[in-house]
Image (cartoon, rainbow, N blue to C red):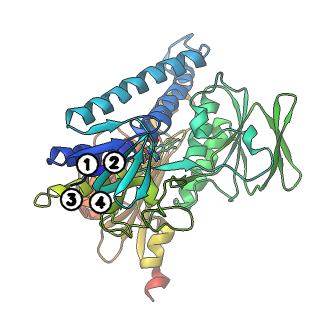
Amino acid sequence: MHDFDLFVIGGGSGGVRCARMAASHGARVGIAEERHWGGTCVNVGCVPKKLMVQAAEYGAWAQDAAGFGWCGLEGTHDWNALITAKNKEIERLNGIYVKLLQGSGVKLFEARATFIDPHTLQVGDRALSADRIVIATGGAPIWPTIPGTELGIVSDNAFFLPSLPRRVVLVGGGYIAVEFAGIFRGLGAEVDLLYRQKLPLRGFDEAMREALAEALTAQGVRLHPSVLLDRLEDIGGVRRLHLSDGRQFDAETVFFALGRDPNTAGLGLDKAAVAVAPNGAVIVDAAHATSQPHIFAIGDVSNKLNLTPVAIAEGHALADRLFAPAHPRDWSFSPVPTAVFSVPPLATCGLTEAQAALRGPADIYEVRFTPMRHIMSGRCRKTFMKLIVDQASQRVVGAHMLGDDAAEMMQAIGVAMTAGATKQDFDRTIGIHPTGAEEWVTLRTRTRTVGVQAAA
Ligand SMILES: Cc1cc2nc3c(=O)[nH]c(=O)nc-3n(C[C@H](O)[C@H](O)[C@H](O)COP(=O)(O)OP(=O)(O)OC[C@H]3O[C@@H](n4cnc5c(N)ncnc54)[C@H](O)[C@@H]3O)c2cc1C
């Protein structure tokens, strides 16, 4: 008899849901968290990031209000007040996570857990055994291997800076880099965004990437594509970043947003004979089992779709499969709607145009317009929407949007696409007027067809 039926390593999005659901199905469950309950999303990810994006938006809104007759709304921003309010909200959420776990009968350990053998974990100063073990240790920011790297910061630090830097150099072209560019710029900092590719957001629809680059420029973010880092140094308190082509950038803060690696270092996976990929990701099958059938991995540590709702769904589904197999909850992992909280936000669901073209003929419907709000505000902020329709089945296989409320709209588009909606379903849906969203159901004229060669 082991100490627990299930032990979860990591109290983040995936681990907490898995532990709670397993306990609610009657299992004896323990969970260890070494840093902060709620994990990355609640403490140094989605939640504080979104609060800071919202903080940054108010500045622009105050300026825009003049176009609607409001006078004198523009003021100054108090960074300390924002960080204090944000920290208070995060503390509240931490407490909710602990209550939820305790309320469902999970035993909590505020300690690091590492493997001693395939069924035994060192949890703080105790050895605990479990019939089944779930690895839900998430990921960690990647630091560049250049001289002076320690003079920079990563996203974990960015939420706790003592003051708003006047000038920030952001290195990276992924969603975290783009989002923080919007945050710092919106709060009044000068921002240089440096990335290796020609455009930010590799893997996203090409036209959306181009539109995002234009939007960042319109916001005042200076873009520097195709860079390679050389070294970072401190020049009397100023950070100087040298590129391999000799260019240099001075800033108060150099922020590396170069992606995240699965968090498996020092976990003792070798002692449990759990196989990992070269980047440290735990290798799992479709049922999230590792090379040890009683050890599972969920969320970012398995490095598939690194998103909070995916980690939660994986944790929930795993707990159901293990302890309530008669009533498993099922999720669709394709397509997965997702958003980048840039300025304005970019949201997407399904295939990019290039991916669709590889599969066969697809019709592209596009619309670009200035939203009603910005005709009045005078702000240069366009909306760009794109629908990709598989010609043979008429199913909508891709939806992409850059513009106000994109994330809010894409959730509903995701439902339609998961249900297999066709272009005709979109066409016969009555719009809500006057909204930007009604454009999704009034896209009558095909912009072009792609993928004809793929079918030949
Ligand atoms: C800046 C940023 C913004 C993001 N924004 C979004 C967003 O807008 N939307 C979205 O869907 N996703 C977003 N993400 C991604 C999201 O946060 C992750 O996909 C999600 O948190 C993954 O959940 P997880 O359970 O796999 O891991 P985590 O939430 O990272 O949890 C892992 C936990 O395990 C703990 N741990 C690690 N090792 C041990 C150990 N040995 N013993 C005990 N505890 C351990 C860690 O302390 C951590 O709390 C963002 C991430 C970042 C960094």
Which amino acid, mark 2?
Leu
Which residue lies under the disc numbered 4? 417
Q: Quadrant of residue 445?
A: bottom left
Name the side, left or right, on which 327 lies relative to 358: left
Q: CA distance from mark 2 to mark 4?
A: 45 Å
Mark whose residue sits in front, 3 or 2: 2
Give the residue displayed 40% in from the left and 60% down from the top.
117
Q: CA distance from mark 3 to mark 1?
A: 17 Å
Which residue lies under the disc numbered 1? 3
Expressed as whole percent of the image width and height from the top left, the position of residue 347 reads: 44, 49
Q: Ligand 1: which quarter? A: top left
Q: CA distance from mark 4 to mark 3?
A: 30 Å
Which amino acid, mark 3?
Leu
Name the side, left or right, on which 107 lies relative to 208: left
User: Does 233 appear above or below 224?
Assistant: above
Q: CA distance from mark 2 to mark 1?
A: 6 Å
Name the side, left or right, on which 388 lies relative to 287: right
Mark whose residue sits in front, 3 or 1: 1
Which amino acid, mark 1?
Asp
Expressed as whole percent of the image width and height from the top left, the position of residue 151 reads: 75, 38
In the rendered structure, which disc, 2 or 1, sits on the residue that comes first in sequence?
1
Q: CA distance from mark 3 to mark 2?
A: 20 Å
Which amino acid, mark 4?
Met
User: Does 52 appear above or below 425?
Assistant: above
